[in-house]
Every structure is written in structure tokens, then in C-alpha cells.
Amino acid sequence: MIVAQLSVSVDGYLAGPSPSLEEPLGIGGMQLHEWVIRLEAWRKQHGLEGGEVDIDTRLVEEAVRGIGAVVMGRKMFSGGEGPWKNDPNSSGWWGDEPPFHAPVFVVTHHPREPLELTGTTFHFVTDGVETAVAQARDAAGSDNVSIAGGAMVVQECLAAGLLDELTVHTAPIFLGGGIRLFEDGTPPKRLELLDVVAARLATHVRYRIPA
Amino acid sequence: MIVAQLSVSVDGYLAGPSPSLEEPLGIGGMQLHEWVIRLEAWRKQHGLEGGEVDIDTRLVEEAVRGIGAVVMGRKMFSGGEGPWKNDPNSSGWWGDEPPFHAPVFVVTHHPREPLELTGTTFHFVTDGVETAVAQARDAAGSDNVSIAGGAMVVQECLAAGLLDELTVHTAPIFLGGGIRLFEDGTPPKRLELLDVVAARLATHVRYRIPA
């Protein structure tokens, strides 16, 4: 199964306007992830101690359970506006121990040898999202493939009918601009509501996307 | 208190693309309202018999409770692409017994005498949303003012800091295009999550919008 999880504002942005070194997710964009980065489950996954345990914890646990491979765009690998922006050979902004614990397939225009780090190998795929998803599916075996983002990769998966489940974490904020989760052109479709979890810092809604 | 309730698709549209006489809410747009038009509570309000009673019913009851006046845009009054489109003197597409049961203030460029129908008087306000809201507030007294739409009227209320509560009914569909509930430019703001009701045909989320 191919799944995606995205945090988005009430007005539909998964990053705020004017990304910069100080605010790589755009102005106000970090607020989208407040619900998760304060959690013990998330901090542990990122090699950090402490953190909270509450209703949102289940979402993080479900998000990592059964993920056998990850697909992401090049900007997500290397940091949108980070110091790695124009360095196709950077090891990205995930550090030496990336939080994925599964092979990651990066959709990019820059051919490159696989990059092995602790617990993760980044593979660079230069012939598009569908190929990256196919390779990730092979690597995942009977486990799920997670589409980590950004928006364009998710859009392309939707356009190609590749996504089976989408979880939208809506943070209770207006960002006023930035990068939209959904541009015009998502194939019209009726979804199936699978699950809703309401919490103070995000409303989590999981949909099945029929073929 | 000034409140708004809007039904929207997962990809953020409150009407689909290419509105026509047959589909005034755009292609697929009627699906946004499936959750409500099948309900007894809604049908009764519209002078119809029959209908269902379930978890969504509470939302309709809350939506009408304590509404002392309504504000809407001209297209919502007269029917976006209906036969009334270019007739500033039409009585709109709401029929002789409109479902509002409170005075309605229509934001329009066409000055016009008030239109009295059964249970509702439509007032036409030509100097903008803020004036319409002020007049509606006076008419409502201690009751709430409901901003019925469309998107532009809601946007203008948000920009002017007039909206106190927003309820978003998200229907589990992709429309792929149409009229966005939120264009770029909504004032950035942190909202407060008040209430979430999950149902098969819509996830209902109510936010408080701080001043």
C-alpha cells in the first residue's frame, strides 16, 4: 500500500510564504508540525530524549508502523532553502542518523550513487516519481511505501493514481500563503473516510483513495 | 458573534469547476452538500418532508440555532449561473419561502428596495461587506450573524477581522478545481479548535478565530 501523511494549515498550505534559512518551512510553517515535534514518539525516532505522550502519539506510531520504504522530492532530501540548496552532493539536512529507518528514494534530476547513513540508504532516482515508487515498492516488499512529500511528489502520485491512503493533519492556523498541498488538477474522485482523531494542535483525518 | 459554515472538498474548493445551469455549484459541487441535504433537519428548514436523522443532524441544528441575521454575496442570492445571473431585480433562487428565517443582507453593486418574502426580508447593501455585517449585527441584536458565503464574502470578513467562528465541513472528495474557500492573503493567525464531529459524508471542524 502507498500512503502519505501531510500537515497542512486550515487555508491549505503545507509550508508558509518566503522560506529562508531561518524558516525553511516559510513564515509560520513550523507551526504545522507543533503537534508532532513535541511528542516523545517523534523525538525518540529522531534520536532525542523527553517529550510528551498524548492522543497525537497514536498518529506517529501508526505513521511509522509497517513502512518499508520512503519516497521524497529532492528539496525534502536536501533542505528547501538550506545551505544544501545548490549542492547536489550534500548529504541533506537529515544528519548522519536520518529518522526514516527504511530505504529512501529521492526523486531528483541529479544522478548520484546511493548514500548510506545509519539505518537508511538514500537512493537517487532520475526518471520520475512513478519509477521511484516502483523501486520503493520492490524494496518495501509486503510493507507500505510512505510518500513523505513535498507537495509536487504527492500531486504526481495522485495524478498517477498511485496513492492508496492519505492522512491530512490540519493544524488550526491560517498561513495566508505558501505552498499548497493541493493545486488545481487533482483528479476528481470520491474518497472514503477511514478515521478522524481530533486534538488541540491538529485534526487528523485519514482517507482511502479508491483506484 | 459572527459565524460562518462552509462545505469544502479535501482539496479546498467550495464549488467545482465550470458552473452551469445544470450544475450551478460546478462539476461535482453538489457532492459537497450531500451530508446535509439528505437530513430531515435540513429538509424541514426548506419546507420538505422526510429525510434522515443521524450524527450530522446536530450540526444543522447548531447552525440555525441563534442566528438573528444572515449576510451573503450577490451570486449566492441570485444564483451563480442561474437564469437570474444578469437580472438585478430577480427574487433569487431561494423561491418564495427562503430557508433563512431571519433577515438577509446581500452585498451587491445594485441598489434595490428590500424584498419581503415569507419569513425573510432581503436587504441589499451597496457599500461593502463591513456595512452589511454592521447592519446584520444591528438586526440580530443579541443573536448571531451568519456569513452564508460565497468565498469572497468570507475572505473579506476574515481580512477585516470580523469572523468569530468558522465551521468547515470537509466532504471526502477531490474536486480538482473550482472556487477556493481560501485564496492567498488570509491574515496569518493561530485559531482555536473548538469541536470536531466525524461522519461518513463530512468531517465537521469548528474553530474560534481570535481577534
Image (cartoon, coloured by chain):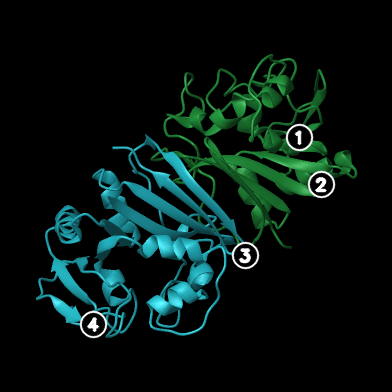
Chain colours: A cyan, B green
Quickly name the residue at label 2. B134
> Label 3 amino acid?
Lys
Quickly name the residue at label 4. A118
> Element under label 4?
loop
Which of the marked residues, 1 or 2, is nearer the chain's N terminus?
1
Q: A56 and A18: which one is in front?
A: A56
**Foreground tag (3 vs 1):** 1
Quickly name the residue at label 1. B64
**Foreground tag (3 vs 4):** 4
Which chain is indicated by disc 2? Answer: B
Are the two marked residues, 4 and 2, in contact with CB atoms closer than 8 angstroms? Answer: no
Same chain assignment for discs 1 and 4: no
Which chain is indicated by disc 1? Answer: B
Pointer 1 local density, CA inside 10 Å: few below 14, some 14–19, many at least 20: some
Query: Marks 3 and 4, Cα distance to the nearest angstrom?
Result: 39 Å
**Foreground tag (1 vs 2):** 1
Same chain assignment for discs 1 and 2: yes
> Element under label 1?
helix
